[in-house]
Amino acid sequence: MKTSLVAFVLALSAIAVGQTTAPQPQAQPAGSQPAASQQPGTAPAGAGQAGASAQPQKKEIKDPAEYNAYVGAVQQKDPAAQISGLEAFLTQYPNSVVKEDALEALMGAYQKANNAAKMADTANRLLAANPDNVRALALLAVTERAAQKWTDAFQHATRGLQAVPKMQKPDGVSDPDFQKQKDQLTAALNSIAGFSALQLKDYGNAQKYLRASVEANPNNLEDVYPLALAYLSANPPDTVNGLFFIARAAGLAPAGQAQTQISNYGKSVYTKYHGSDQGWTELLATAKTTPLPPAGFTISKYVPPTPAEQAAELVKTKQPKEMSFAEWELVLSAGKPEDAEKVWNAIKGVPLQMEGQVIKASEKELQIAGSQDDIDQKRADIILAMTGVIPARLMPKEGSTLDFEGTPVSYTPSPFVMTMEKGTLLTKAAPAKKSPARRRPTKPKPQ
């Protein structure tokens, strides 16, 4: 549990119920009763009530016995005595005008007594009295986050955010201080709502609430890193924002293993998205001194070349006789007509010694996989017509690796199959010229 936040929530409750020394009721005109809210330290105006207004209606305890029971309970210094007094007051006066204030004081007393179960139970009693009690909603959200009750924590945090604007300023609190309290509560509730949404894989809400929390406190690593994950885990991901906040998290993390892990993860995502790590160091430097992405911030996305572009580049940089079988296959199946023609003219009718895997064997014909991709798929991309009948003792087994010689005579581009004639088996003494070890260049994948 984040005890600092629990303490903060309960500190607001202490302000609300006025836990300073309260004077005794002053003499009242005949027929009137003491007005608790009109005296310093008694029930303040509008504490914890829903519905904001500039001048909230004062709470008045009209029964002196009720007034004395309330003041006597809240003034107790010992948590056990305060709990006893407040529970007795709430039992005796279940419909008191200060019921909500008494419950807030009771919630704080149970916290001081380290009774988490009763503290949460009192928070629920508060919500039964006022569904918009921000302090009860915040306290429940904190404890549920600690207990990993993500759905409950998210619901209470978002209800708390909706209720914050309805909070009424307690007596004795300045406008700036009250606004500061509301801002701190809002940031804390945004943090809980966003982190809980992230655990629930609700990435849209995780982004929304964590971003609001980070904008309020951009140096809080506990929100910055989850915000990065919320952007990167979404489908589709918001990679640009995700990378900025990963870089920001790396700069905020203390030196050591955590910082290294965050930085390495960010660099790997950046490299995959951008196509290289060029610019990653500069992004780290920018994010370290810039809390939020600057206007117009972007990262260029690497777009892999198409198979036709890869084929064209191969033809520019390699002679056909220097290419592997997989590269021939790429050019002949995906290249531009002029590139395919250039390669085919260079190998057509030329006896070639190669290596491949036997897919299917018969006396006069072998079906062979010549590229690693087709070996993996157990698909023949070469049809080899033999010069004669293969002796039984030399008949290759399906799945075995084979050295052979053949002369290309034709091909079909899709699915790619090259037909060879004048096929002969080679011995290991005659090494193959073309190995299938290389795969075809990778086709671009959608990101």
Image (spheres, grey):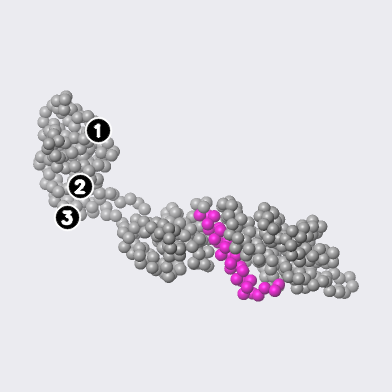
Q: Could you tell me which residue is drawn at 51 percent across and 57 percent down?
A: 206
Q: Position of residue 198 (x, y in %)?
A: 50, 54
Query: Mark 3 to mark 2: distance in Å?
Result: 13 Å
Classify the position of the N terminus by image quarter. Answer: bottom right
Labelled pair 1, 2 in contact (Cβ < 8 Å)? no
Query: Disc 3 marks which residue?
Result: 316
Mark 2 lies on a secondary structure that is helix
Between residue 394 and residue 201, name the one nearer to us.
394
Q: Could you tell me which residue is drawn at 44 percent across and 54 percent down?
A: 233
Query: Mark 1 to mark 2: distance in Å?
Result: 23 Å
Look at the image and say whether residue 314 sits in the magenta stretch.
no
Query: Disc 2 marks which residue?
Result: 327
Q: Residues within 10 Å of mark 2 (few under 14, many from 20)?
A: many
Labelled pair 1, 3 in contact (Cβ < 8 Å)? no
Q: Left of 13 or right of it: where is 152?
A: left
Q: Earlier in the sequence, mark 1 or mark 3?
A: 3
Disc 1 residue type?
A: Gly
Q: Residue furthest right?
A: 30
Q: Can residue 413 be seen here?
A: no
Disc 2 residue type?
A: Glu
Query: Mark 1 to mark 3: distance in Å?
Result: 35 Å
Residue 253 lies in quadrant: bottom left
Q: Main secondary structure of the magenta part?
A: helix
Query: Disc 1 marks which residue?
Result: 399
